[in-house]
Amino acid sequence: MMKAFLIFLICMGFGCHIMAQDATKYTDKVILKDGSKLYGSIVSWDVTNLLVLRLQNGGECKIPSNTIKKVEQAEIDGMKKIGGFSLQPKKIYGSISAAALVGRSPWGESSLGGALHANARYAIHRLWAVGLGAGAELYLPDQTIEIHSYPTYATVLWQPAKRLGIQGSVGYAWVGRGQNADYSKTYTGASGGRYVAIQLQYAFNTHLFLFAGVQSSAKKREWTQVWDERNHGYDRYQHNRMALGLTYTL
């Protein structure tokens, strides 16, 4: 009786209405320092001030942060939420990623650039999602080794642990002409090749992720020799690079 009365006072004192709650229908469990428990969906949480919890009747309960002992993930129809981001089966997720790229050519030169990617994924399970993606990778123009590329790919996301996910991608990287040249060659054209990538991501919350990974794509550059245009050929190589960036999930 005392616990129920304290819960009532806290919620009424901060402008919300409560009613009988079914714990299995909610995503979050708030445990107070007096041992009381509240179930709902967290709307926001300023750890120095208030936690706002949405209740069964649609009302919001404002709980002082200094009365909270801890917050746990509750079961949702037998399914547990994972960390800061939980895949909901049969739901489509969109995301936008931006990253810095650092690579090295087979000839030992560094390539520096940036990438912007867009993805759409379908959650087939609370741990798995599959989807499609496309991106643009642009490199610094003062390098002689690299050309811009535009990968398109299929992707698989596995989220096995709290806040952590692993994403793998396989596809084809289209490329620009490869206008860069060195002192002995003029590049006349270029073509892309197979694209593969794997990355580890960490969820700060339900929308924002930090990720780090490696990428590789096959590229081919056609050239003619500066002092004798009759002498021509091509360089075929594997471009490997590391990526570090942020993903925003819609």
Image: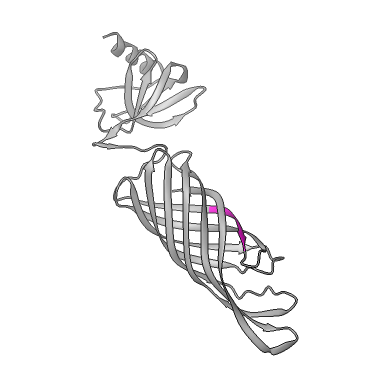
- Horizontally, residue 226 falls left or right of residue 37, namely right
Furthest toward the top, the residue is 2
Q: Is residue 135 left or right of residue 4?
A: right
Q: Residue at x 51, y 52 (%)?
A: 213
* Residue 101 lies in the magenta-colored region: yes
> Residue 166 or 89: which is nearer the viewer?
166
Q: Residue at x 46, y 20 (%)?
A: 65
Instruction: Please state which of residues 15 and 70 is positioned toward the viewer in this rendering.
Output: 70
Coloured how?
one colour
> In the image as oriented, which residue stretches furthest toward the bottom?
230
From the viewer's side, name the closer residue of 248 and 241. Answer: 241
Q: Is residue 243 magenta?
A: no
Tell me residue 249's x, y (percent). Answer: 45, 48
Q: Is residue 160 above or below residue 231?
A: above
Residue 32 screen position, x and y as percent: 38, 17
Residue ID at (32%, 20%): 37
Q: Quadrant of residue 242?
A: bottom right
Q: Residue sitting at 39 percent across and 52 percent down?
A: 157
Indicate the quadrant where residue 235 lies: bottom right
Relative to 215, residue 158 above or below: above
Q: Which residues are magenta?
A: 98-104
Magenta portion: prevailing SS class: strand
Q: Quadrant of the N terminus?
A: top left
- Image location of residue 16, percent across then percent down: 36, 22
